[in-house]
Image (cartoon, rainbow, N blue to C red):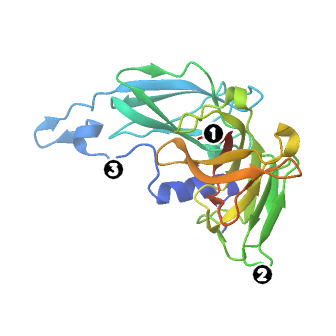
Amino acid sequence: MPVPRSLNSAAAWCLAGVVGCGTPAETPEQTGTTTDSGTAPLIEGDEVSGVVTDETGSPVTDVFVTVSTDFCIPDRTDAEGTFTVGRVSAGTKRLVTYGETAANGLFASISVSFDADGPYAFEAPVVTPRLDEVFPIDTADPAGIQIDTMAGLSLTASPGALQIAPLAPSEIQVARAPLDTAMLEPSDGSELVDLFVLHPILSTIDPPATVAFPSDLGLPEGTRVVFHALDYDLGELVQVAGGSVGADGRPTTDPGTGIPELTWIGISLEESP
């Protein structure tokens, strides 16, 4: 019996050990169950709360949310998109949403690093775009893979380069993410000029795929850009390739470089030396 698409990548993510709550199994000390010496106390910790919406501001309901730490209690959003994750340790951590587990559509998953030494509430919504554009693919196609989205993003992969995540469907899901609501920022401090997200997560591309962004950014030919990809383990956008704007006005990865996986992909202007 096939695994429903809404669970495929989320299941793969869990199987790969990228789950937000770091403890694989609860011990008696963590659950408060009775031991030979009596009932053990519950693990202490703080709460992290917020609301998950799509790019239009509508709530994303029943989506699985975790916070990476030594131990925490995961949560699922309610009808308003709100969540509360309990027993979270202090320090640097990652908020993780598993977009494909949502009840009201197919959404992008996100991993965002943040610091908190006490109870923490996200002031702005955690925005995960709806993945409305889907491209069925054949990873064994001898011609490789070529997709061109309605928003103007293109991805080209060599034959056999794309390995879809375990249990995930043979398709690529894409959305353009509005910059004014984006929680992700490049780790090098640069400013994004465009941002897309591609799924299923944990799908690798070797050699990396050539990517071209839309021409509607209005960048002059020859402008140098930097391509950033979300590292789900770090919860940050990291540099993965350089590129330049061609005669068609499209920022494209340099020859021999590209993106190594399906994830959030952003571009910024390369700083002058």
Q: Residue at x 14, y 36 (%)?
A: 38
Query: Do the CB atoms of the residues marked 1 and 3 lie less than 8 Å apart?
Result: no
Give the CA separation, mark 2 to mark 1: 40 Å
Is residue 106 at all visible to an observer of this figure?
no
Left or right of 146 in this view: 80: left
The amino acid type of the residue labelled 3 equals Ala
Write the residue at 61% across / 65% down: 167
Between discs 1 and 3, the one toward the N terminus: 3
Where does label 1 land, which residue? 272
Tell me which label, 2 or 1, sits earlier in the chain.
2
Task: Check disc 2 and give the amino acid type.
Answer: Pro
Q: Does the CB distance between marks 2 and 1 fall below 8 Å?
A: no
Residue 137 horizontal side relative to residue 209, left or right? right
Give the secondary structure at mark 3. Answer: loop
Badge 1 local density, few (<14 within 10 Å), some, or many (20+)?
few
Badge number at residue 106: none
The residue positioned 44% from the left and 55% from the top of the image is 17
Local secondary structure at mark 1: loop
Tell me where residue 42 appears, x and y as whole percent. Answer: 26, 31
Q: Amino acid at mark 1?
A: Ser
The residue under label 2 is 142
Residue closer to the observer: 10 or 128 = 128
Question: Pointer 2: residues within 10 angstroms few (<14), some, or many (20+)?
Answer: few
N-terminal of the pair, mark 2 or mark 3, is 3
Residue labelled with disc 3: 25
- Residue 179 in the image: x percent, y percent? 71, 31
